[in-house]
Amino acid sequence: MALSRQWRRRLAYGGNATLVTGLVLALLGVIYGVADRNRARWDLSSDSANQLQPDTLKKLELLAADGQEVEVIAFSSQEGKADTFFRDRAMKDLLAELDVHSATVKTRFVDFDRERLTAESLGVTEYGHLVVRRGEQRVDLKAREIFRNQGTGAERSLEFLGESAFSRAAAQLLSNRRKVIYTLRGHGELDPDERGPGGLSELKSLLDQENYELKPLDFFFDRERTGAPTVPQDAAALLIARPKAALTDAEEDALITYVASGGAVGIFWDPGAPLPDLVERLGVTSPEGVVMDKLRVFPYNDRPVPTYGGHGMVEDLREERIVTVVAHVAPVRVPEELPPWITPSTVLRTSRDGWIDRGGVLDKGAAVYEPEIDLIGPVDMAVALELSPGQGGLVNEGKRVSRVLLMGDADALSNMIMGEGPGNPSFAVNAARWLTWDDARLAVVGRPTRVRRLALTEEDQGRIRWLVLGLLPALSILAGGAVWANRRGQ
């Protein structure tokens, strides 16, 4: 029986549609296979929130340097709870990211209820546990270290901290021992245990995650009763943050002796604060005045936006254009000619529009450059010095190169500013890494804060002021006049 023309047309169209559909499905299958084999992935989330942080990638690279396998074993959460799916999904996503970015990391997700023998063989007795192993080294992370509840009531939510927990475990695997950084006290310095705005508790927490211990040191109380003040033998570095009183002669001798033996010191101070004699012996001075710049963090007049020098400590921050916030900064001046055993490097400085302000008139509450009393910039705010042994210098022959970081601002390390500046956590941790010779680990720490700060010049502020006070009211008047004229015409 012959088919009608209408049916022949329908069969032709249907056959073509089936063929095209089959080809599309085959193409999708090929694309999926290629993507799965080559692990193609895109992150369209805000701030690349689903990608591993640069610091984590750096640690994965270091772990892979010797080719030794790293095993990451994650255990499932307890079934039947409201947040079980989120917990397991977040853990699996982390394992997938680790597996993608490192050939030496082997991941495994274990169902705690169905694979009890695996849990018992590893000594795991809790749901949501994470085990990271490398050779004979092992780090265990409990569920409470990986997940954290935020908010209360209806706004209560669960936050996944798995990547930061793994990063902390990786830091422990990379370091054979926990390095101790002593913070000097007894002269009004910032306190690592103080949780208020003027404390260093956030810095202490950051360094703890990187396997550093921030420990207070009092030259007079933390010593043998009959002995002279000394820096402990286990010190990886010494931190002096905002001394309000001068060091005694005995303390100065202890500091010089420590540096002469190849030690590392970070000194942070405020304008007008007394400086250790070590700074003067290195030829560095802090001129009278406060660092200012036309480019500043809005709306603060005493927060110049620093530019980064060529030092490795801030290299990644410079490339990523992440700002470190400083406040009420003292200038740091390094002489043009230094002894051959001192190698200086600028870390933070002002723009070409910066200057050292020494008082004078104010313009709408903000300092302005006055050439008759101020000193034109650019002005250094932080410098790093490497002191070679011998050569008639400070460091004894046969010792390793000593490192000294000098910065005219201690607020940048404090709890008050640490959360204000997107780059402050990275700057602080990288300063510790550099002082303790962990140069290979220099990287951006975490992700920049979502809080955005405007950096405006005086001219920018003036334009905004006239826009708000002049143009917008004028437009309102014109709009009102147009409406009145239109109604009057009707």
Image (cartoon, rainbow, N blue to C red):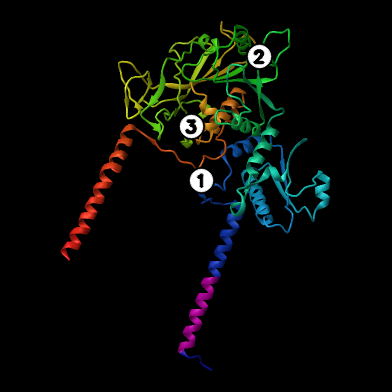
**Circle 1 Cα neighbour tier, 10 Å, few/some/many (<14 / 14–19 / ≥20):** few
User: Do labels 2 and 3 touch, CB within 8 Å?
Assistant: no
Q: Please name the amino acid that badge 3 sits on.
A: Thr
Residue located 60% across and 36% down the image: 58
439 or 300, nearer to the observer:
300
Rendered location of residue 400, percent (x, y): 63, 15
Q: Nearer the viewer, mark 1 or mark 2?
A: 2
Q: Please name the amino acid that badge 2 sits on.
A: Phe
Q: Which residue is mark 1?
A: 47
482 or 137, nearer to the observer:
482
- Mark 3: which secondary structure? loop
Magenta: main secondary structure: helix
**Circle 2 Cα neighbour tier, 10 Å, few/some/many (<14 / 14–19 / ≥20):** many
Q: Which residue is mark 2?
A: 219
> In which quadrant of the rendered view does residue 186 lie?
top right
Rendered location of residue 276, percent (x, y): 55, 12
Location of residue 130 with respect to 417 vertically, above or below: below
Q: Which residue is mark 3?
A: 324
Q: Earlier in the sequence, mark 1 or mark 2?
A: 1
Quadrant including the N terminus: bottom right
Q: Please name the amino acid that badge 1 sits on.
A: Asp
| Magenta-tinted stretch | 5-21
Residue 11 among magenta residues: yes
Residue located 63% across and 14% down the image: 262
Check residue 323 in the rendering and tell me which mark sits there, or answer none: none
> In which quadrant of the rendered view does residue 243 lie?
top right
9 or 214, nearer to the observer:
214
Q: CA distance from mark 2 to mark 3?
A: 32 Å
Residue at the far left in the pictured view: 489
Residue located 35% across and 33% down the image: 457
